[in-house]
Amino acid sequence: MSATSSIFVSRIKGLPMLDANGDQVGKVRDVVIQNRSSRRSPKVKGLVVDLFAHRRIFFPMERVRSVDGNQVIISGLVNTRRFEAREREVLVTAQLFDRTVQRADSPVPETIYDVAIRHTRGREWELAEVALREAGRRPFQRSHVTIVDWSEVPDFIDNPGPQDAEQQVMRLSELKPADVARELHDMDATLRAAVVEAMDDERLAEALEELPEDEQVAVINALDTDRVADILEEMDPDDAADLIAELEPALAENILQRMEPEEAKDVRTLLSYDAATAGGLMNPEPVVLGIDATVADALAGVRREEVTPAMAALAFICRSPLDTPTGRYVGAVHIQRLLREPPSVLVASLIDPDIAPLTPQSNVAQVSRYFATYDLVCAPVVDAERRLLGAVTVDDVLDHILPNDWRGVQLDRLDAEVIDG
């Protein structure tokens, strides 16, 4: 959809909604918006649509292809589940029209006459402007209408309180970490603080890994230092190191001192390397096996819940000790090869001789070329003594080479794949 100028909700209400074939599926009844943190413009979540079967449903804004004065064009299937507004969602026509407000630079109270929305980037829409007129005027009385930016209207959407934090946490417990991060990303700051306070450490750690760095830092700065240490212990060491590197040095050191010694040691090791090298990108907890391990042992190692799919792609064979830095690195075995072999076979006999290890000094460009050349998603990192230090996965590299705000952009677009309502 190409960029459009603002369009007032009163012009959208009652418009026919057509599918990609031009067939009418219903009429627009209202627009659903939701407040966001950091004084960002409220997000347009979707449309309330009256179907011809006399059922009112929700349709996500990300699947609206165009809006004009005559019709609304959509794509994809229509979820016919009856619409029910969620907490913190606001219906523009039903709940905002005719609300009385008092602007700082207006001598008299005003009422909301209309609200304009605009298409921003991708498939996203947000609230843009508010049309106001003097309060107390009857509908048939003529009065001057003033159009202002949404931010000039005080208490446009009531600030949420923390009283429903427990309920929100229960709802979030059913979601995947990326979806939890999306919800936290869109929450009002007050509600987000209450929800973060009520979440358990493991769940919050998983969600933090999916948030943009600036939002991670904002969450951490608002928490007690002891709890921050507990949360970072639940995170993958490389993600914890990335987050600690963004904090003020004094706070970072205070947190490290409060972490369990073994957990803090891994993080300090990663922080000793340049962030743009294999040493700075690696996870020091790959799947490591002894030279006498069998295929059954290897499969048990890669199927552990805490092992990510990318990290499970390779099992590394080393001489003892098996904790990183290990004894001498022997080689690596693909999980696909393990799945094709009998459980009693020794993994040392299945090593792929073509997997050359990286050094901790390998820069991100070299690591990127490595993955592209060998068509791998995971790679070993060894030191000068050929001890295994950890493993780099392709997602670690992508995190580093993508723009700094890629997580925020991705979170804003996640709804495109979800039928909400």
Image (cartoon, helix red, strand yellow):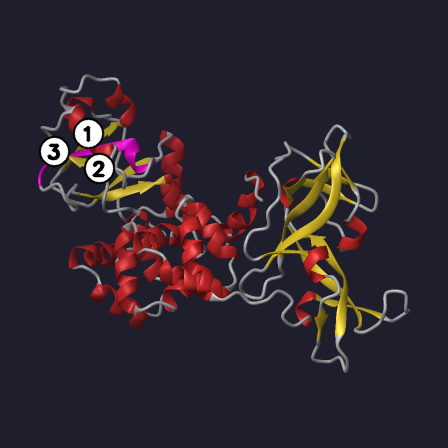
Instruction: Say whether residue 359 is visible.
Output: yes
Relative to 339, 209 lies left or right: right
Q: Residue at x 72, y 32 (%)?
A: 19
Which SS class for mark 1? helix
Residue marked by disc 1: 298
Label number found at residue 378: none
Whole-percent x, y for residue 220 in the image: 37, 64
**Badge 2 density bin: few <14, some 14–19, many ≥20, Cα 10 Å:** many
Give the distance between the C-alpha atoms of the residues marked 3 and 2, in whole angstroms. Answer: 10 Å
State how many labels appear: 3
Residue stretch rendered in magenta on the structure:
310-320
Q: Is residue 390 magenta?
A: no
Which residue, given by chain and number where applicable, does mark 3 sit on? Answer: 290
List x then y, in percent, for residue 403. 50, 52
Q: Nearer the viewer, residue 391 or 124?
A: 124
Q: What residue would you read off at disc 2?
A: 287
The C terminus - image quarter: top right
Q: Is residue 404 visible?
A: no
Residue 201, quarter of picture: bottom left
The local crowd at label 3, few if under 14, some if 14 to 19, many if 20 or more residues have their Cα within 10 Å, is many
Marks 1,3: beta carbons within 8 A:
no
Amino acid identity at mark 2: Val
Q: Please state, as top left, top right, bottom left or bottom right, where the N terminus lies in the image.
A: top right
Characterize the local packing of mark 1: few (<14), some (14-19) or many (20 or more) Cα atoms within 10 angstroms.
many
Tag 3's secondary structure? loop
